[in-house]
Image (cartoon, rainbow, N blue to C red):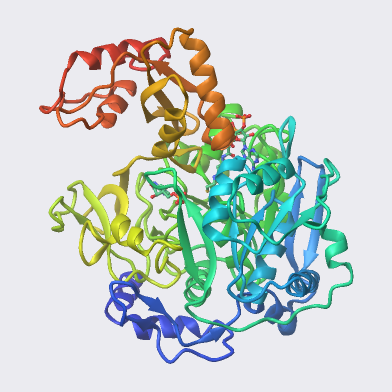
Amino acid sequence: MRYAQLHQRSITDPNGFWMEQAQAIDWTTPPSKALFDDKAPLFEWFRDGQVNTCWNALDRHVENGRADQLAVIHDSPVTNSITRLTYREMRDQVAKLAGALSAQGVTKGDRVIIYMPMVPEALMAMLACARLGAIHSVVFGGFAAHELAVRINDAKPKCVIAGSCGIEPGRVVAYKPLLDGAIAEATHKPDFCVILQRDALQAELIAGRDHDWAEFVKDAAPADCVPVEGSHPAYILYTSGTTGQPKGVIRATAGHLVALNWSMKNIYNVDPGDVFWAASDVGWVVGHSYICYAPLITGNTTIVFEGKPVGTPDAGTFWRVISEHKVKSFFTAPTAFRAVKREDPKGDYVGKYDLSCLKTVYLAGERADPDTIIWAQEQLKVPVIDHWWQTETGWAIAANPVGYEALPVKLGSPAVAMPGYNLQVLDEGGHPVPPGTLGAIALKLPLPPGTLPTLWNAEARFHKSYLDQFPGYYATGDAGYMDEDGYVYIMARTDDVINVAGHRLSTGAMEEVLASHPDVAECAVIGVSDDLKGQLPLGFLCLNKGADRKNDEIVDECVRLVRDQIGPVAAFKLAVVVDRLPKTRSGKILRATMVNIADSKPFKVPATIDDPIILDEIAVELKKLGYARS
Ligand code: COA
Ligand code: AMP
């Protein structure tokens, strides 16, 4: 067990272990040590080093013989185009964009919001910020104007960089009106916007505020990389919590570089020059780490895919891209494979492509169900590796270190803790439980490099959300168990976060929107099981007395409200009107019990329930929607 020894060392000698890994990074000033614990329980990594992320992702490869190697391949079945960019081209374009931003006053520490579809310019915008030491915050295109406004108010960006539109199968999503709406709603106003005009839809620009990207960069002088201290925030990425106010996860610069670089060889088993593809979106953490940063830091070619697993144009798209661009390691969410499997269960499309380049497939973002893993293994005839992580950690908490020592795969488990993660399963009192016993999964502090040091503008919330429950530990929000071999099994969330098609969503945020409907007196949103998306949100609405309108009308309005306020990505399409919600005598809504009823799972009626009859009423309504079948 070479890996077990490596992991052990990372826990007992974090300074030695991570300083060794840090040697793979180009530093302007090397750090004196890895771990800074003087602010514990807040920890920092490589704080006194000086470094630039863009240099490590682009310039150093240009200097070291990779100038003409492809850095980015944009494969876009929705626009029927493929664009290839070398490391030199990326470096030059990013340096010009950074120069143009700098000329408009963007400097180290300023925030820049990026609201873009899956185009290479999204990566350029991220890297241009990194070049200047500006802090980017990418907002997923499937979020509505209100969500964008919430992020603008929290991050207070000097500038917003946006695309004119995104392209979803069958429709063009105009981003500019959403951006304009968000800026109108937000109390903070950015100084200026840069708009990438796409052929599918040109946006109208507001004179004096908006710049056309092409004009903006045309005569710009390229900017040099600005070294920043290791603890400087590289980016803020907002993620769902229990309320409508998302949490701004901060990623510190140096730990991000070191950890991502370690992960590429040791987990994803790629070397410089190899082609790596994460089929996700730059708006999510997977996109940050494994579409943009890690492959470029390592000197890989990264694929930026603008399409869907099915329907763009068919269920063979993934295999076409892998074969055409010679992808060695492929990363996607289980839901994407379920979508492909549903359309092509026998894998007819798989047989049409030469997939001999593909060596390993990685799944994350949600629980990988054994059926999906087995199907993928049988079709692709390569190892299918589940790994578990979250926005907060930025890279895998548990994985199979395939490039270091391939461990046996156990179906249903994302395998073992990665370096620096001291993973424990705790009971309610914070005591470790024996192997095989279900508990809360917590990580003994410090977390390794690359993970969040705190939340943007919300240190108290960081303590409350993650550190207070089990002193000395970071609470992951996931529950599960560990077996005798240290393999972890992730079973459920311990909070009100649900996972819809690999997208993390807050039922609390949806409840806040529903409660704003004038006819809704009280509501609850739960996540019900779905064969394709893993979970789907389902709302229960109790109406105000005197709301004498048709229930269907109110339900339709509520569905539209969530789409308008949170965005289509919430996939909120199911809601029912009920007379009452099941509660404990102290007034807590019994969401977990409702989930069990909906999913036809056995459950115990909680002893503290106020009125058990309400559960029957809920079951009747759920049956009408096709749930609660037994
Ligand atoms: N901009 C605008 N709208 C978007 C969007 C974007 N970037 N991404 C998604 N949407 C919209 C979709 O068009 C859809 O709208 P609709 O209700 O009008 O149909 C809605 O948001 C839900 O999207 P999605 O969850 O993607 O569902 P889908 O039914 O379109 O596709 C899958 C289902 C399984 C094919 C798709 O979810 C998928 O590819 N998932 C992979 C998930 C993933 O990569 N997650 C990242 C974590 S690793
Ligand atoms: P996100 O922050 O959007 O990446 O979502 C993180 C959450 O998704 C985790 O806390 C888990 O609940 C879930 N998740 C991610 N990967 C896995 C996995 N491999 N197995 C089970 N759950 C996962």
Would residue 340 be seen by someone viewing this image from the given angle?
Answer: no
Q: Residue at x 83, y 64 (%)?
A: 216
Left or right: residue 37 compared with residue 574: left
Q: Is residue 474 above or below residue 350?
A: below
Would residue 351 be seen by someone viewing this image from the given angle?
Answer: yes
Q: Residue furthest left?
A: 607
User: Looking at the picture, how far across and down is residue 289, in whole percent?
Assistant: 55, 62
Q: Residue at x 25, y 27 (%)?
A: 593
The quarter of the picture where the N terminus appears is bottom left
Q: Is residue 352 above or below residue 394?
A: above
User: Looking at the picture, how far across and down is residue 83, in whole percent?
Assistant: 81, 55
Q: Is residue 346 above or below residue 626?
A: below
Q: Quadrant of residue 534?
A: top left
Q: Please tell me how many numbered marks the rendered image carries.
A: 0
Q: Residue at x 67, y 50 (%)?
A: 322
Q: Residue at x 24, y 22 (%)?
A: 582
Q: Nearer the viewer, residue 427 or 436?
A: 427
Q: Nearer the viewer, residue 150 or 142?
A: 150
User: Looking at the picture, how far across and down is residue 75, in whole percent?
Assistant: 75, 50
Q: Quadrant of residue 134?
A: bottom right
Q: Is residue 235 above or below residue 537?
A: below
Left or right: residue 473 compared with residue 577: left
Q: Quadrant of residue 32?
A: bottom left
Left or right: residue 433 compared with residue 355: left
